[in-house]
Amino acid sequence: MFSIASATNLPRPARRPSVWLGVAVGLWAIGVLAGLGSLWSYALRPGAETAAPKAWPQASGLARVPGRWTLVMFLHPRCPCSRASLAELDKLLARSSGVLQGWIVAVRPSGTHPDWPHTAAMRRASALTGTQTIVDDGGRLAGQFQARTSGETFLYHPAGQLVFHGGLTPARGHEGDNPGSEAILAYLRGRWGSSITTTPVFGCPLLESHTPSLAAARKPP
Amino acid sequence: MQASPRAGKRVLILLAEDDPGDQELTRRALQGKVLRTDLRIVENGEELLDYLYRRGAYAAPDAAPRPDLILLDLNMPRMGGREVLARLKHDPALCRIPIVVLTTSSQETDIVRSYDLGCNSYIQKPVDIEQFIQVVQQLENYWFEVVTLPPAVEEEPATSAGAICPGL
Amino acid sequence: MSDSYIASFSPEILHARAEQIFAERLRQVHVRTDRWFAGLMVVQYVAGIAVALTISPRTWIGPTSALHVHVLAATLLGALIASLPVALALLEPGRAITRHVVAVAQMLFSALLIHLTGGRIETHFHVFGSLAFLAFYRDYSVLLTATAVVALDHWLRGIYWPQSVYGVLTPSPYRWLEHAGWVLLEVGGLWLASLENLKEMQRDALQKAALEHAHEVTEQEVAQRTAELARKNQELDEFTYVASHDLQEPVRKLISFSKLLEQDLGGQLPPQAAKDLQFIVDAATRMRDLIQALLALSRTGRSAMQLAPVDLNTCADRALQALELRLQETGAEVVRDPLPTVVGDATLLTQLYQNLLGNALKFIAPGQPPRIHLTARQNENGWVLGVQDNGIGIQPEHAERIFRPFQRLHSRSQYEGTGIGLAICKKAVERHGGQIWVQSQPGAGSHFQFTLATAMPGPDKNFDKNLAESAPCKPPLELASAC
């Protein structure tokens, strides 16, 4: 019997693979790699770094339940990346066995109509158990927490200090294992140190860079 | 009927025929006629030429008197009738002698070729014995009583211009 | 076809041919799969755009939105990814480079789609599905290329965006193995399935090659045997001809000299001797007739057929002309159906009619003038022609015998003839690619029928230049007594 090896390396028509073909394949490979590379770059471009308030901002108006861990997540209601953050939060809540009190803040920039934040994502957010969903008109709360990016999450120790500040997604719009969720879970389980854990936040900017409401809401930590 | 110049003289027929049966039949057919016909027989083309050129077996003087008529069978062994016919009719010394092809073949090609080579007439041997005897006797009658035979070349040389027989 | 039979063929030639067949089939598989993937690429491209528009149509900065990069990526990058494989599938289907490019592009689409759906677990199934589809190529190197692309993707992201690979900053080394394990499991399974498939294709190819070979061998044998048969037939006819021809001369002598003997003995022959002599002459005459009949039969087999459109009415007319005397003697009445024009040899066909008509006029019922009907009808294969009479008829059990040479059903004192006439008819009909048969009952007349193939058999090789006597439509008078 003739060998399969010899048959899969077919006796092909004796045409030398043309140089142009090789060039085309080369250029194509470079092109697609560059394309995918830039996609990933975009997805992994973190949001603006901010200095988060290390202690619970009292003037925020958000109630903090003493003795319980408090988590605040800021979301852009229309950003597609918010879905991933919510999914991660959902997983987190499922594993946190009730020690967590969550706040989900839907930031509504000024100049948009009142119905603007009522999206499917936010409806889903409202349905999450152990959380409360509110709308932040004008981005006032966001300013108090210094939150700039959708998905930016703050975790406060039951005693009131900030222990975690960052995102819960591994990349923009991507679900999956991420350092943020891991860190939070570690904290909740009692493994925590003195420093604040930060992770990059991947999401759309909550507000336009120089909105007056942001400037106005800026307060020293 | 005009009498032949040789009236009273015996005429000689030379028969070239290889089959003994046909030889016998021809001999029998020629018997019983008023005109006295002598018959000499040769069995193939080579022997015919030997006879006419008086060589070989016929080298002796008076062994081969000149025939008045040659009866030629086409299908003879060794040299066949067609070849001999061609030879004879191209030979100035012999071409004058009338040759009658007497053969079994009815092939168109044989007939045409024989005439092209210069035979004087072509007769197909009848199958039936009685018809054969009749034909031979008619032959005798025609050539020796009706027709005027030419003198020998030695007596009267060939005329040169326009002769079909090549001149001397 | 059994393996031992296959093994009896020359192995090198067989395997070479089988390899050819196998390679061709495999190439066809590759071409088909290439084209199929080209279609899939287009579908995936459209699906990518649909996904991007559904999940992440716009990107936001506060209140303002713009077209999301994903939509751009799905449209442009998707097109780019699909461009080369589709182009190659259309322009260079079946080539190795094409399917490797397809494999790479397919994996890239997986990456793109996973990215566009935000890393959804379900989208990862596309990778495994793609590997399975790539197995259609039955080429393990393609699977390796695809696996390499996946590995490369993990590795590059591991370097530049480590947290994107597993999300954790210190990935456990076993995760990598776990991923690799699943992929290898699938690739391994697909590869084994491929191998099995290829082996089957090989077996099929070998079978096909053996079948072809057997066919060829059979065809050759058939051709050889046919040629030999034709040659033997021709030899037989030649021999018959030569023998008959050479026999004629002595027979003629026999007859001639018997008659001369009669004459020589004149009236002096005792009556007993005269009778003896008469028997000799009769026997010789009969021998001559038989030889001439044989000669006629062999000539029918040997003569060159001059094929031309022949009006059978003309042949029938000429045959009747040759039998004119007998027609008048018997007061026969001849009617005919309109006879067609067929392609054939006019001489043979005239001879055929003459023999059949001659028979019809010979074997007549006493006290009844013969009535002959020349029939013609059509069936799906062509014309069926016939000669029907109201003569003495033939017993059905003899219906086949009579077509054999020298077979007679009556003694010579009843009817004359050598018994060769119908054999000559049969040969003439067979040379026209037809068949001849008789329908008859004793006392009810006979209907001899024959077919002539409307398409002639191949060029006639029975050409003997010495038999150039058959000019078209010359009535063969010498055969008139051959019945």
Image (cartoon, rainbow, N blue to C red):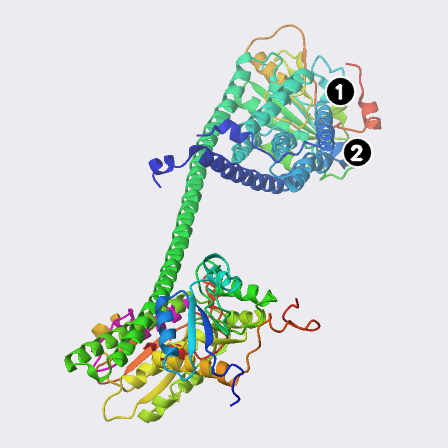
For residue A86, above or below residue C469: above
Q: Is residue C69 left or right of residue C14?
A: right
Q: Is residue C422 magenta?
A: yes
Write the start and end of the magenta stretch as one range: C402-431
Q: Is residue A106 left or right of residue B79?
A: right
Q: Residue at x 72, y 17 (%)?
A: A57
Residue bearing the label numbered 2: A110
Residue A109 visible in the displayed image: yes
From the viewer's side, name the closer residue of A165 and B23. Answer: B23
Residue A146's disc number:
1
Which amino acid is tagged 1?
Answer: Gln
Q: Residue at x 68, y 34 (%)?
A: C81
Which amino acid is tagged 2?
Answer: Ser
For residue C131, above or below residue C36: above
Gap between marks 2 and 1, in whole Å?
17 Å
For residue B159, above or below residue C63: below
What x and y, as percent, mark residue C481? 34, 79
Q: Chain under label 1?
A: A
| Occupied quadrant, residue A135 | top right
Q: Is residue C259 left or right of residue C67?
A: left
From the viewer's side, name the closer residue of C222 and B3. Answer: B3
Looking at the rendered structure, the number of numbered marks drawn on it comes to 2
Residue C56 visible in the displayed image: no
